Image (spheres, helix red, strand yellow):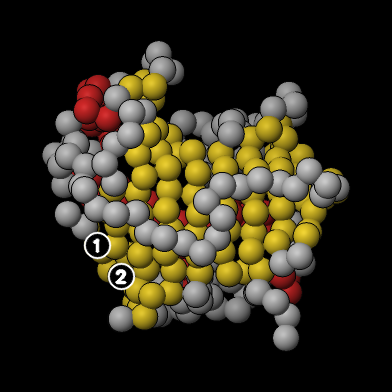
Amino acid sequence: MKYSEQYQIRWHDTDATLKIRPTQLLALMQETSNRHIATSGMSLDKLRDQKKLGFILSKTRVEIARRPSANEEITVETWTNPSRSFGFNRSFLVRVKEEVVAKADTLWALVGVEDRQFHKMEETGYVFEDEPALELSMPPRLKIPNDLCLEELGTRRIVYSDIDYNMHMNNTRYADMLCDFLPLDETELLRGFSLSYLHEAAYGHRITVLSGKQNDSRFFRTIDEDGTVCLEAQLFLQKKE
């Protein structure tokens, strides 16, 4: 069944336009999914401590009709789709009253905390809903064009405020980090993003951020100091009037 939570957008969740920051939007979605999982009786903490298992996020696609403003109340609804071998999809719908302001789909896998191997979803004891995934207007797969020249924008060290208990950059933090490298006028045009998580960015490491723009999209690639690609991303921008 579908699960929902309500939240009020705090002033500190917003940017200079008083609209919710992309990272905070992702955080509220994932907080809702965490609470959904906990209703099964096996919270994420219990899953890690008792079964030595944890979920890792592979891909996120978010389509934004508009970003809610400070003090608006939103409803975040989430549901899962039937497990496919070692992965499953989770969908999200974000509303202000009856208005759909954002929707997203995500791809997850279950990994052993100690053996680092993929595990079948049945090991969690969760029951996955037979609900259809959301259809988004953006491409289902992220691909940086081969003919696009990516320019180095700078470097970024992974610090305390980025990490979670896994000691690497939390997946929700990437969205704001990428916006940090955008001109401010482009962040105001953000209408969606697609993130492909390829490798963990560990605490204390320095990553290099590369980017290039084509048509109405801004593409990113982040590379760890050891040469490993951590993330590839596509940010979708509204056309300027």
Q: Quadrant of the N terminus?
A: bottom left
**Left or right: where 205 falls relative to 110:** right
Residue 143 in picture, x, y percent from top left: 66, 45
Name the residue that disc number 1 marks: 4
Position above or below: 13 against 87: below
Residue 32 in picture, x, y percent from top left: 31, 55
Using the rendered view, name the quadrant where residue 212 is placed.
Answer: bottom right
Residue that appears at 43% across and 48% down: 106
Q: Amino acid at mark 2?
A: Thr
Name the disc covering residue 206, or none.
Answer: none
Name the residue that disc number 2 marks: 75
Residue that appears at 43% across and 74% down: 101
Query: Do tag 2 and tag 1 residues touch (Cβ < 8 Å)?
Result: yes
Q: Check disc 2 and report its element: helix, strand or loop.
A: strand
Residue 149 in picture, x, y percent from top left: 85, 47
Q: Amino acid at mark 1?
A: Ser
User: In this rendering, does residue 55 appear at all?
Assistant: no
Name the outermost residue toward the bottom. 241
Residue 236 in picture, x, y percent from top left: 64, 64
